[in-house]
């Protein structure tokens, strides 16, 4: 099996470049959320979702047919891989319940 060497400096530069690409679409980020994930202008609502969860100790929420369990792991996964409708509906439920404008 062939082996190859990866230059540490080149790897560090590549990883640094990825740190500023949107978690969803790899466009240039305009914000980083409370967990440090980058989001582009189109996907900032996902970062806003994480920020609200972090600021409120990651509560469980339910809005049929969607929900998010208590804990950072669940909130981050919903933001990263959840359908747009799911994230928007959960944000809407938070806004209605709290009166806060989030995204």
Image (cartoon, rainbow, N blue to C red):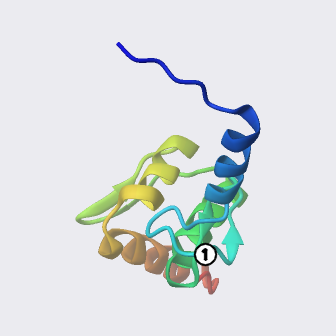
The residue depicted at 62 percent of the width and 30 percent of the height is 6
For this rendering, which residue is in front, 16 or 80?
Answer: 16
Q: Residue furthest top?
A: 1
Question: The C terminus lies in which quarter of the figure?
Answer: bottom right
Q: Is residue 71 visible?
A: no
Q: Quadrant of residue 11?
A: top right
- Where residue 61 sits: x, y (%)? 44, 58
Q: Residues within 10 Å of mark 1 (few under 14, many from 20)?
A: some
- Residue annotated with mark 1: 28
For this rendering, which residue is in front, 103 or 68?
Answer: 103
Residue 73, relative to residue 26: is it above or below?
above
The residue depicted at 64 percent of the width and 83 percent of the height is 100
Q: Is residue 1 visible?
A: yes
Residue 47, relative to residue 13: is it above or below?
below
Question: The N terminus lies in which quarter of the figure?
Answer: top left
Element assignment for label 1: loop
- Specify whether 28 is left or right of 32: left
- Specify whether 54 is left or right of 44: right
- Where residue 43 sits: x, y (%)? 51, 77
- Where residue 25 sits: x, y (%)? 44, 70
- Where residue 40 sits: x, y (%)? 57, 77
- Specify whether 18 is left or right of 27: right
Q: Residue furthest right?
A: 9
Residue 43, relative to residue 79: is it above or below?
below
The residue depicted at 66 percent of the width and 56 percent of the height is 19
């Amino acid at each position: 099996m062939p082996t190859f060497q990866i230059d540490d400096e080149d790897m560090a530069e590549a990883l640094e470049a990825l740190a500023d690409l949107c978690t969803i679409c790899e466009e240039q980020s305009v914000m980083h959320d409370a967990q440090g994930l980058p989001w582009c202008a189109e996907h900032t609502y996902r970062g806003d979702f994480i920020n609200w969860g972090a600021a409120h100790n990651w509560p469980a929420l339910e809005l049929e047919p969607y929900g998010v369990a208590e804990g950072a792991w669940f909130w981050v996964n919903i933001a990263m891989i959840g359908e747009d409708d799911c994230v928007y509906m959960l944000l809407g439920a938070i806004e209605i319940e709290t009166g806060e404008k989030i995204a």
